[in-house]
Image (cartoon, coloured by chain):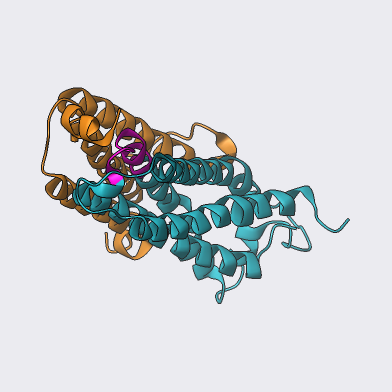
Amino acid sequence: MDNDAERALLPNGGALGAVLAAGIGSLALGVFVIANEAGIFTAPSLYGPSGGLSGRSTFAVVTWLVAWGILHARWRDRNLPAIRVLTWALALAGLGILMTFPPVWRLL
Amino acid sequence: MLFSDRSLWTMLHGLVLSGGAFMLLVTALFALRAMAAPDGASVPARQSTGFAGLTAAIAVLLWMSVLGGTYIVFPMYRATPPEGIASLADYPRALLMSNADTRWLHAFAMEIKEHMPWIAAMLATAAAFVARRHRATLLADPALRHVTGALLALALLLVASVALLGVFVNKMAPLW
């Protein structure tokens, strides 16, 4: 497929679904971390030697992949505003990063 | 023996996989800028597939580093020392926590190292997917180029921060 054909035939929604899903996955990891630190929800350890990290990270990855699958199915045939989706994805990722930052959860 | 199995795993995790991802992230960000084409221009297939391959390699390296770090290196780091042991040198977490001056390396640095690399891996995977799916037009599409560049830049920031913290931890409590 040449450039013009791809531009005409391949909407950007599929790619942007992956971008937003990465933001959702990042936020999910932050939520699992902060919920664990606040004693609200503790993801079970799925591999003893790695402790709770194995559960938190696995739950976040599952959330990421499910979100990616849903967004891909819904957006793959659509053209979306790329910068707006990127802004949301970065905002979600930023929140996720903030929630995995120890000084933040020590405020709880 | 010059290197133990434990130190080899640490070097593979930190230097080969994370270090490789770090260098490729810098390369990809440079390439994205250097190979940018005017909107709608035709991009040589070698450049577009090369860039897609570069981002895929970053994602693969980061996932290998994250999974190896979580399931191989981290268990060695957090192993609990037996009662009454004379030296904590083989138990990095216990060693760091035994001294008030180094306790922050576990409570701050390692806590960050446990989680943030997963975010970098997810972001890099998204960038690789965008670069692969739109490989024919990405370098000549300002919006998608901007999206890919932002994801790679954030991943680079996270990888660099975590690598620096890893150096601090490894300096004070290496896995011998």
Out of B78 and B110, give the one closest to the viewer: B110
Residue A44 lies, with reference to residue B55, above or below; the image says above
* Residue at 36% over, 55% down: B35
On the image, which quarter does residue A105 sit in? bottom left
Residue A48 lies, with reference to residue B88, above or below; the image says above
Quarter of the image with the N terminus of chain B is: bottom right
Image x and y of residue A15, in percent: 25, 36
Relative placement, left or right, of A56 versus B86 is: left
Stretch of the chain drawn in magenta: B126-138
Residue A59 lies, with reference to residue B99, above or below; the image says above
Out of B24 and A60, give the one closest to the viewer: B24
State the orange chain: A
Image x and y of residue B150, in percent: 28, 55
* Residue at 35% over, 37% down: B129
Out of A95 and A41, give the one closest to the viewer: A95
Q: Colour of chain B?
A: cyan
User: Residue B80, can we see it?
Assistant: no
On the image, which quarter does residue A61 sit in? top left
* Residue at 63% over, 64% down: B170
Outermost residue to the bottom: B101
What secondary structure do most residues of the magenta stretch adopt?
helix
Relative placement, left or right, of B45 versus B149 is: right
Quarter of the image with the C terminus of chain B is: bottom right
Relative placement, left or right, of B126 versus A16 is: right
Relative placement, left or right, of A27 versus B122 is: left
Out of B130 and B112, give the one closest to the viewer: B130
Image x and y of residue B51, in percent: 42, 46
